[in-house]
Structure formats: structure tokens, C-alpha cells
Image: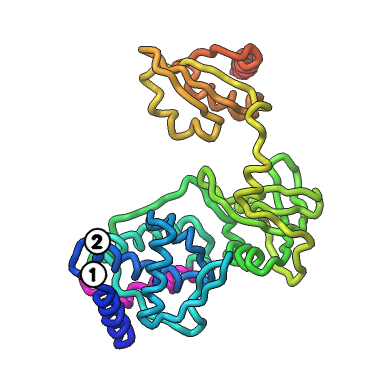
Amino acid sequence: MKVLKVFIIKLKSYIWNIGVSIMSLDNISRFDRIIAILIQLQSKQIIRAKDLADRFDVSLRTIYRDIRTLEASGVPINSEAGIGYSIVEGYRLPPIMFTKEEAGSFVAAEKLMEKFTDKSLGAHHQSAMFKIKSVLKGKEKAWIDALEKHIHIDPKENVFNENLPDAMSILFESIAKNTQVRIDYQALNSESPTNRSIEPVGLFNENDFWYVYAYCHIRSDYRQFRTDRMLSIIGSNIGFEQLHPPLSELRTAFEPKIESLTEVVILVDKSVTRFIKGARKQYGFISEKDLGDVVEMTFKTRFIENGFSRWYLMFSDYASIVKPAEFKERIKSLLTESLSRL
């Protein structure tokens, strides 16, 4: 902490010496921002000035000035044009403090990690949380203690196969090191599992499930795999055979073009619209229009045969179909089949 105090004294002194009072509101804000920039520099190997400007909603010129202030205060910062800033390896300062709100956010993060990750990664996070809590002040520790017993998160489904306690850790290592993994995967439309060699590009959570986006060597194409359908997973030292774009680019590139989707328009009684708002996005919801006692909802979907149709049946007694005709026929077919089984 002595090093930290020296740094703060030097930083305050520098801001004072450039002729601006540290007691003005503008410079208190600037001081907080400079400390936040230092913490962010310590959290990443490289960070761009634009990313810092976007985060703090200031100009690039302001970020350049703040970086010069840190350098003048004794922080050894490397800068490379077109790449970004980094702190010289080995230089470290502990975080100054956590606010009670930041400390409270740790509780939510810890509860989410307990429920939405596998056992191995959850254990690593728990260990990290102990380290974070150890540097908190007494009142922040009390704040966390008061919250921990009163927050509970219960996912709708098991997000991982319970027999694979370290699946996410293996996938993280694969993504970081660009190495392949082998999985036994039970696809929804297959009677038996298949053994596949994949190159994981990234993970994402959607509708309470974790998915791995990966290049599949069996299909010679990109596929997504739901983690709870993985029956086994083994890491390897075999490197990727291809260079993959970022996950966000891949997901956007492989999303169906909106013009190729079927437009569905339905009228829903206002009395039930609030009950379906949470799920409609995953079925391609586009827009809604208030028509008095009913709400006109427009969707663009590729799941008209089963997914969208079966979801619509959940509230069909409070709704009517405007278009298309093929959707009306599909609903009639499902209802007829259902009646024949009574």
C-alpha cells in the first residue's frame, strides 16, 4: 500500500503542478477517470485509446492527456501506434478501493457462476472471490454478508452435463490456445451420439443454455453445440487447422437473412400479451401495434412448421392469425391431430 500512496501523491502533485486545482469538480472527475484507466490498463495486455474514450465518453485527445499524466506520475506505459497501450511487465498497483455497489455486484456474479458454469470453473471463481473479499474494507464485507444469504438464482435447465465437471474449463483452454477438442455429442435430431473433432471459436448463452460455436471437422463447416448435450469432452494439443473470425462476426454471418424468413402477423388479446413478451424474441418478434383490445404482432421466423406453431398454440385461444395462409393451415393440422388423440 506504500507504493500506492506514493503513486497517488505523485499523481495529485502532477495535476496540481499543471495549474489546475484538484478540488474542482472537473478534476475530481478527471482523477477518478485516470485511476479507472490505470485499473483497466492493469486488467488487459493491450488496450486501445478508442476503447478508453468510448468507455469514459471522452475524446481521444482527453485520453492521450490522461495517459501522459499517468506516465508523468511514474507509471511505465508502453505505446505503439495502431496497436494500443500496455503497462510494462512486472509493474503492479493494487486496486484503490471498491464501492459498496461494486462489492454488491460480486454477490450477483458469484451466484450466477454457481448456477451457470460447470463445477471446475465455479471453483476457480470461488477462489478468486475469496481473494477479492480479502482486500475489501469492513463495511464492504458487511454489505456482501448481508446480501449473500438473500439472493438465489435457479436456472430453468441444467446448463452442463453433470458428468462433465470441467467442460467449460477445457473449452476456455481450447479457445485461448487454439487447440482442438473431441466431443461425443447427442444431437436433438439423432438417435445416437456422434464423436466429433471441433475447433471451438467461442461460447454464448441464449435462452438459459450455453452453446459452443465451433468448426466441425465431420461437417467441414461451422456448427453450434449445446453444452448439456455433450456426453464427453477431451482436450488435445492438436492446433487449429483454420484461422477463425471472432464469434460475433460468425454468428452474424450465419444468421438467416431476414428476407428469407416467413412473415407472420397475429392478433393477441391484451389480457395475455404480458405473459408472452418474455419468449417472443426467440421466435423472431419484429414489432407490435396497439389496436385497442388486441395487439398486432409481427414476426419473421424460419420455425413455422414446428417451433413457432407449437409456441402459438400455448395462447391460441386468445389470438387469431392475420397471415400467412400456410401458418393457418399448419395450426389447423396440429389441432386436428391433437383432437384425434383424445
**Number of numbered tags placed on the structure image:** 2
**Residue 263 sits in which quadrant?**
top right
Q: In front: 115, or 19?
A: 19
Q: Residue at x 72, y 63 (%)?
A: 181
Q: Which residues are magenta?
A: 123-141
Residue 9 in percent (x, y) is at 26, 81
Please name the residue that numbered disc 1 is placed on: 20
Which mark, by number, is residue 146? none
Residue at the location (54% across, 35% down)? 282
Depth check: give the residue in front, 311 or 178: 178
| Amino acid at the residue labelled 2 | Asp
Q: Which residue is mark 2?
A: 26
Label 1 crowding class (10 Å Cα cut-off): few <14, some 14-19, many 20+? few
Q: Nearer the viewer, residue 335 or 166?
A: 166
Q: What's the distance in space between the residues labelled 1 and 2, CA to CA? A: 10 Å
From the image, give the main secondary structure of the stretch colored magenta. Answer: helix
Asked whether residue 306 is in view, the answer is no
Q: Quadrant of the C terminus?
A: top right
Instruction: Label 2: state its secondary structure.
Output: helix
Q: Residue at x 59, y 55 (%)?
A: 203
Mark 1–mark 2 CB contact (< 8 Å):
yes
The question of residue 324 being in magenta is answered with: no
Query: Which quadrant does the N terminus fall into?
Result: bottom left
Res 188 → quadrant: top right
- Callout 1: SS: loop
Q: Position of residue 139 (x, y in %)?
A: 21, 70
